[in-house]
Amino acid sequence: METIITQLKALPEEIKVGITGIGSMGKGLAFQCHITPGFRPAAISNRNLAKAEGCAKWLGVTYEIVDTVSELNSAIARKVLAVCDDCSLVCSSEEIDVLIESTNDPLAGAKHALKAIEYNQHIVMMNHEAEVMYGPLIMKKAEEKGLIYTVADGDQPASMKILIDDLAFYGFDLVMAGNIKGYLDRYTNPAKIAPEADKRSLDHKMTSSFTDGSKLCVEMSVIANALDLRTPVPGMYGHRMDHINDIFKHYDFDSLYEDKKPVVDYILGAQPKGGVFAVGYTDKEYQQFTLDWFPVDMGSGPYYLFYRPYHLRHIEALKCVAEAILYGNSRLKPKYGIKTNVFCYAKENLKQGDKIDGAGGFACYGLIENLEDFGEDGVPICIAEDVVLKKDYKKDERILMKDVDFQSQSEAFELYFETLKIKGDIKMEYPFASQEVLY
């Protein structure tokens, strides 16, 4: 059987990739497209044009700054990298085969993807916030046109899916899909985290969202919605341990798996840092007998630990793109609709009139919840930017939708309400309908 690389090299034309968002991830994606056989970066865009142009110069390729779709298409036809500050141009070209959405703005990311689908571009979603909020709707629109929608390889959700696919092939049932997190401080904020962020040249608010657990919960919501998994409690357990091999000391898997419903969780401070894991179950005596030959750290049965000690971000991101183009496969997609989401909890005592400032902000942290347990009355942290509280909240209280004025983000919320209808089996009740949002 030919390898993927062999097949890519044999393509009559390179796969033309458009990238929206040239931050650290987008820059890496452009580089990977540049060095991988069968691919080429056709167009890149960023609101800050200097970042996009700087990326093009760094790649060492011929490029042109474009202001219209016709200019963009002309550059692509001449195999010149098109560079712009208007992401909609990249999404409006039928010369591009696949769009990789790499901004960290959920609404903008969704709009980019939906526009690209109109122009027959396959969608690879590196924007997990857009995936959690709007993935089912984007997937539906793509599939209606015979296009592929997939979450990108390289980050934790797709890395977990690789492990889980292996378990299924081996005949194991999935019990837990998990993330290995290095640190957690629910109450950090952009000011507190600034010194650590500056050491790594990272955005303060984004780093705060990593540290307060909001980003972790978003990642786990992505995999939960794709595979119909649950969180055992709001925010998951997150047991602290020294090494992933200690997991059987901290979880009662008989109790956790009593209802045969697999869960998502994370472990804290354990080696290998940056890894992901899965716990599988088999009641086959022969399998248990042969697995006893392996180190006991893997488990003594019927539960067994499998882990991947890394996720490689942009370095491994293009494999799912190749599989989408060559085989029509999607690595990971939200086929169960929004079964979980990440909702706002107060980081401190908040007053009526205070503004919630989104994931990683000063006001709230986000916890993953099952919608069937808690309903849809929570405020999704991914789009809770500049929404105003109508009442006081105490530290660690869950913020309710009926207690916020979200008119400043009405478009984001309208699209969310529309997405909730996709493949949903949860009763829809909107106590906040008095805000006259139309969808």
Image (cartoon, helix red, strand yellow):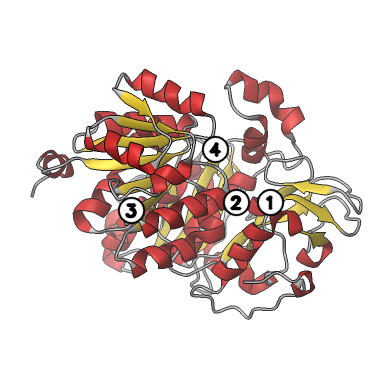
Which residue is tagged 4?
A: 270
Q: Earlier in the sequence, mark 2 or mark 1?
A: 2
Residue 418 against residue 71 in the figure, above or below: below
Q: Is residue 356 left or right of residue 7?
A: right
Dot placed on the residue nearer the N-terminal end, 1 or 3: 3
Q: Quadrant of residue 37?
A: top left
Whether residues under marks 2 and 4 lie with C-beta atoms below 8 angstroms apart, the answer is no
Q: Nearer the viewer, residue 224 or 14?
A: 14
In the drawing, what numbered circle is on residue 366?
A: 1
How far is the residue under mark 2 from the one under mark 4? 18 Å
Q: Residue at x 25, y 28 (%)?
A: 35
- Foreground mark, 4 or 1? 1
Q: Closest to the observer: 28 or 410? A: 410
Q: Secondary structure at mark 3?
A: loop
Q: Amino acid at mark 1?
A: Gly
The reply to whether dot 2 and dot 1 touch (C-beta < 8 Å) is yes
Q: Nearer the viewer, mark 4 or mark 3?
A: 3
- Disc 2, SS: helix
- Where residue 36 appears, as percent x and y from the top left, is 24, 33
Disc 1 versus disc 3: nearer the observer: 3
The residue that mark 2 highlights is 217
10 Å neighbourhood of mark 2: few (<14), some, or many (≥20)?
many
- What amino acid is found at the position of numbered circle 4 in the picture? Ala
Tell me the mark number nearer the camera, choosing from 2 and 3.
Answer: 3
Q: CA distance from mark 1 to mark 3?
A: 32 Å
The answer to whether residue 152 of the structure is visible from this angle is no
- How far is mark 2 from mark 3, CA to CA? 29 Å
State which tag comes first along the sequence, 2 or 3. 3
Residue carrying label 3: 121
